[in-house]
């Protein structure tokens, strides 16, 4: 019972970090008008400062992923918490744009460090199964749901905007104390059959599959960012819906996302193939996107938006990461770093690409997401094909 209790406590603390991460994803955007006043700069400068989060991720993902295999997972969880704490305390008190930019870069580093220490830990706790990683998506969504309410509340009572940051810092401090006595699972070494590694054909397939997984890391992130950035404008300006109806499409996407996470958690607990999940979810996400592009009916668009969230944002990205980890069971941290590094590239490039497309029309900017969906289906099919040629088996773990 003691071991079970300790594992549950560890899981709770790891998930709590991602509630805080959900805060971190939106807290700057939610406080943009307050930050323009606090820093005495135009909105464009605040937007530039926010871009530091993406820079931090790009800088740190490969480094933290690689080192988490060499050092302890717990160290990187604490590193992520420390960086987020510095960000939460530093931003509301900073009066310098360069210093503020440094703090936002730290938020990006925090994201990568938490991922390197947490995704690997959940897979090791579950002996190779990635179902608990899928729940990370849901708890981060919970944080994204809470933070706008907190910001709105403090604004309504004319309180200092920094209180939302202080709550974020307080949660991290409490969680650091809760984590202190807890032991992380030992990332035990895995027996890898030498015969497989000697085959040039096997090595070639593994290399190609690895490239495909990295591309999928980009595509799965791009698919979601593309949608969330443009759905409201598309609904209002192109489809002719009211502003409330257009915003509601995004809300339905979020509800669908949480429902999809619950389904994937159940399916992966029954050892459903990750690649089958990837294919099915990508196909339905692409079909839902097609309906959204073509439909001008509110109800049909609302159903399609829910289905898109249910599939594209259901944790399928985390599911793909679990399958990728099985290719390199002794380098899970580095694999996590590579996978999310490509996701970070998507975070950086999608706004640039869609910004260019929007110069033609909002419809062109939004509808081009269908291309991402189609390519994601093709990539997931290829991964599944190569898995059949050289199965990604669940490895035996020593000890």
Image (cartoon, rainbow, N blue to C red):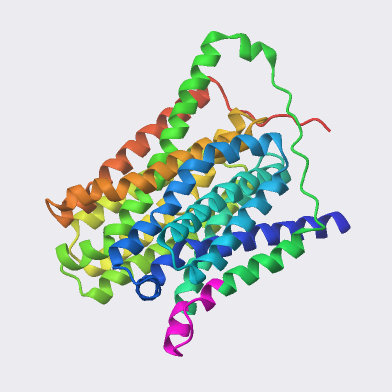
Q: Left or right? Give the position of 375 relative to 356.
A: right
Outermost residue to the front: 96
- Residue furthest bottom as drawn: 157
Magenta stretch, overall SS: helix
Whole-percent x and y of residue 24?
50, 62
Quarter of the picture containing the C terminus is top right
Total numbered labels: 0
Name the spot of residue 73 as percent of width and height, x first: 70, 44
184 to 251, vertically: above or below: above
Residue at (65, 51) in percent of width and height: 79
Return the x and y of residue 22 as percentages of the image width and height: 51, 63
Q: Is residue 397 above or below residue 33?
A: above
Q: In the orientation shown, which residue stands out farthest toward the right? A: 2
Of 102 and 170, nearer the camera is 102
Residue 340 shows up from this direction: no
Examine the structure image and report whether residue 300 is included in the region drawn in magenta.
Answer: no
Q: Can you say whether 189 is above or below 64 in the image?
A: above
Determine if the magenta segment contains residue 162: yes
The picture quadrant where one finds residue 135 is bottom right
* Residue at left offset 45%, top offset 53%: 53
For this view, does 61 lie left or right of residue 395?
left
* Above or below, comparing residue 399 to residue 373 in the picture: above
Pick whichever, 114 or 234, lies toward us: 114
Residue 157 pos. (x, y %)? 46, 90
Residue sitting nearer the eye, 62 or 258: 62
> Can residue 31 be seen at all in this image of the molecule?
yes
Q: Toward which corner of the image does residue 63 lie, by quadrant?
A: top right
In this picture, which residue range is highlighted in magenta?
A: 151-165
Question: For this rendering, which residue is in front, 59 or 375?
Answer: 59
Which quarter of the rendering shows the N terminus?
bottom right
The structure residue drawn at horizontal position 17% and vertical position 56%, both measured from the top left corner, is: 362
């Amino acid at each position: 019972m003691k071991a079970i209790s300790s594992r549950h406590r560890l899981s709770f603390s790891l998930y709590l970090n991602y509630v805080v991460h959900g805060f971190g994803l939106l807290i700057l955007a939610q406080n943009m008008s307050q930050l323009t006043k606090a820093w005495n700069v135009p909105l464009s400068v605040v937007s530039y400062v926010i871009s530091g989060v993406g820079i931090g991720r790009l800088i740190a993902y490969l480094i933290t992923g690689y080192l988490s295999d060499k050092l302890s997972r717990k160290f990187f969880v604490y590193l992520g918490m420390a960086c987020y704490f510095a960000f939460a305390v530093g931003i509301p008190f900073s009066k310098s744009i360069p210093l503020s930019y440094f703090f936002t870069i730290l938020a990006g580093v925090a994201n990568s460090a938490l991922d390197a220490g947490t995704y690997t830990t959940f897979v090791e706790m579950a002996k190779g199964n990635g179902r608990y990683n899928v729940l990370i998506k849901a708890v981060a969504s919970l944080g994204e749901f809470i933070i706008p309410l907190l910001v709105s509340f403090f604004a309504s009572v004319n309180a200092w905007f920094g209180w939302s940051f202080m709550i974020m810092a307080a949660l991290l401090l409490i969680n650091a104390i809760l984590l202190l006595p807890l032991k992380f699972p030992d990332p035990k070494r895995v027996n890898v059959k030498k015969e497989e590694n000697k085959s040039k054909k096997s090595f070639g397939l593994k290399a190609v599959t690895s490239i495909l997984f990295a591309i999928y890391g980009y595509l799965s992130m791009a698919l979601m960012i593309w949608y969330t950035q443009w759905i409201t404008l598309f609904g209002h300006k192109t489809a002719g819906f009211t502003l409330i109806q257009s915003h509601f499409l995004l809300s339905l996407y979020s509800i669908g996302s949480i429902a999809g996470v619950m389904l994937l958690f159940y399916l992966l607990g029954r050892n459903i193939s990750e690649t089958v999940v990837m294919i099915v979810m990508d196909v339905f996400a692409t079909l839902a996107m097609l309906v959204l592009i073509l439909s001008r009916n509110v109800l049909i668009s609302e159903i399609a938006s829910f289905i898109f969230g249910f599939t594209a944002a259901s944790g399928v990205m985390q599911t793909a990461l679990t399958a990728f980890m099985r290719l390199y069971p002794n380098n899970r941290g580095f694999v996590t770093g590579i996978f999310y590094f490509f996701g970070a590239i998507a975070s950086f490039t999608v706004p640039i690409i869609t910004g260019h497309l929007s110069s033609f029309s909002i419809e062109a900017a939004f509808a081009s997401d269908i291309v991402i969906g189609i390519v994601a289906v093709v990539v997931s099919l290829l991964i599944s094909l190569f898995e059949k040629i050289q199965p990604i088996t669940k490895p035996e773990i020593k000890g």
